[in-house]
Image (cartoon, rainbow, N blue to C red):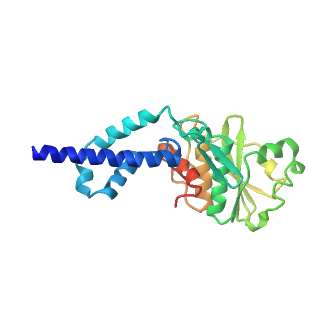
Amino acid sequence: MQLLCYEHVIVLCLTLSVTEFLEGFYVKYGSFIPLTESEVLEYLKKQANSDLSHRSGHSHTREMTRYRAALASAPVAGFMVTYNKHTLSLEDLSTLEEQNWLNDQIINMYGELIMEATEHKVHFFNSFFHKQLVAKGYDGVKRWTKKVDLFSKWLLLIPIHLEIHWSLVTVTMATKTISYYDSQGIVFRHTTDVSTVVPHRFFSPQGIPQQKNDSDCGVFVLEYCRCLSVKQPLLFSQDDMPRIRKRIYKELCDCRLNR
């Protein structure tokens, strides 16, 4: 009897701990889109000894499922993320869920975080830059960088959005090299548009990570940008997309890149 009571107390304590964690998480991120089970387990380990976490069985999973279902139809009212001139609504952030297509707001604010993380040694162009460049030529964008010394940057990142597909053009300033990154292996015929802004030589990287669906191109572009900006190899794959989507969601809400 005492053993059963002890086990009941353990389950009750775990349930309360999980509920407390989920409530805080929901308020902070506006939804459970970026939540992972490993985060809940890590929280439990911090709240109690490893034995207690180990003996939890599937109680934390059941509580997560119950709590998420209860709040699924009750999003945090008016949830917004603001950073510099960027504002993200819960609708914007929801484009990071599962296989949704990322929108311009997500792309542009993440680019801002990349510039901050690199102490502005990298410049990220607004996603509308290329559209304006194609439509109106150099005269249409020459004021976009009026307050930016591009030649003080080592890398320029230019997201390209053509109809329903995201890709990336980069400019390495030291070598004046334009590179094109496409997660579907599409050859981009508009790289010459960028050459009206920066003298160039073209380079098409081989063997870069490729998507295996029609929905993750925007996530691939942001991960290309993140890795290139900190000079890390492109070692991610399609299998990493669910994890990367959750990480990007949290980074946007935290207004900083996670190291």
- 225 to the left or right of 20: right
- Residue 248 in the image, given as x and y percentages of width and height: 55, 49
Query: Residue shown at 54%/40% (left/top)?
Result: 76
Q: Residue 25, percent across and down?
A: 46, 48
> In the picture, which quadrant includes the N terminus?
top left
Q: Is residue 237 visible?
A: no
- Observer-nearest of 151 and 37: 37
In the displayed structure, 151 sits above or below 138; it is below
Q: Quadrant of residue 136?
A: top right
Q: What percent of the width, then of the height, locates residue 198?
A: 81, 58
Side of 49 where 186 appears, left or right: right
Left or right of 123: which side holds 91? left
What residue appears at the point 59 percent right and 38 percent down from the top-left corner? 95
Residue at 22%, 55% (x, y): give it: 51
Q: Residue furthest top?
A: 73
Rendered position, 178 above or below 134:
below
**Of 191 and 23, the residue lying toward us:** 23
Where does residue 15 sit, x and y in percent of width and height? 31, 44
